[in-house]
Image: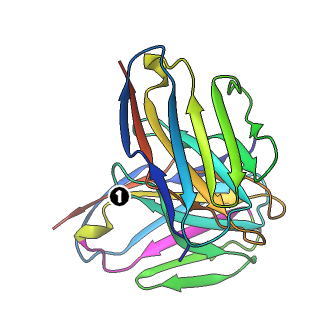
Amino acid sequence: GQQLNQSPQSMFIQEGEDVSMNCTSSSIFNTWLWYKQDPGEGPVLLIALYKAGELTSNGRLTAQFGITRKDSFLNISASIPSDVGIYFCAGQLGGYGNKLVFGAGTILRVKS
Amino acid sequence: GAVVSQHPSRVICKSGTSVKIECRSLDFQATTMFWYRQFPKQSLMLMATSNEGSKATYEQGVEKDKFLINHASLTLSTLTVTSAHPEDSSFYICSARFQGAHEQYFGPGTRLTVT
């Protein structure tokens, strides 16, 4: 089946630093989504990307839909302690009814 | 907007009993709802997709007679874990999608512990 390779698996960074994570696949996706999950809670949608090459920001977060449609990255600028959590990328093949394929997640820990 | 709730948030049940988990879209009509299972430190594993008014589509390896899904209205889907066993203990999360959207909005999850 389709797989997303998400990296890095985990990061331990200093407060104030910028963070970058990415997802790659051998499959072409029509939509890329980035979610954040806090411990014991459900994932929260951060950014949705719909077109190849699209660059979208949400506050300190910026994500891009790769030109080849096989990858996406998420950047977090000036990290703060509340950025701690697990970040998942998710790709959707085909149309509206199609299910999401999730990456394995990137665990972000911030040193204050 | 796009708020999804789940009830209960935590449940402990004895082995052999059944447990029902509710998933509700609070401020939109969800034509499709999804049920996921998540083990500690792992990603989300899709169990089934349910469309309002029709039978759920289960992923390979998921027993449909054990995990009963009902999507009776555009705002409510239920997952019933029948004859629960300790290995069914997990974090169950639902998500919902409204018609014409690509995004899925997730509920807060239900922690099931089977003793």
Dot 1 alpha-carbon crowd within 10 angstroms: few under 14, some 14 to 19, many 20 or more: some
Q: Tell me if residue A16 comes above or below residue B40 in the rendering.
A: below
Q: Nearer the viewer, residue A46 or B99?
A: B99
**Residue B95 sits above or below residue A34 on the image:** above
* Amino acid beneath label 1: Gly
Left or right, B9 with reference to A3: left
Can you say whether A14 is above or below A10 in the image? below
Task: Determine the residue positioned at 70% across, 56% down.
Answer: B73
* Residue marked by disc 1: A85
Residue A102, percent across and down?
Answer: 61, 51
Q: Within the magenta stretch, is there residue B47?
A: no
Left or right: residue B5 versus residue A100 is: left
Q: Magenta includes A75?
A: yes
- Observer-nearest of A9 and A84: A84
Task: Tell which residue pokes out farthest to the top in this image.
Answer: B16
x then y, percent, for residue A14 = 23, 68
| Residue at x-position 59% and y-position 55% | B95
Q: Is residue A54 left or right of residue A105?
A: right
Element at label 1: strand
Q: Which residues are the magenta region?
A: A70-80
Residue B77 location (% of width, % of height): 63, 49
Asked whether A40 or A59 is in front, the reply is: A40
Quadrant location of the C terminus of chain B in the rendered image: top left
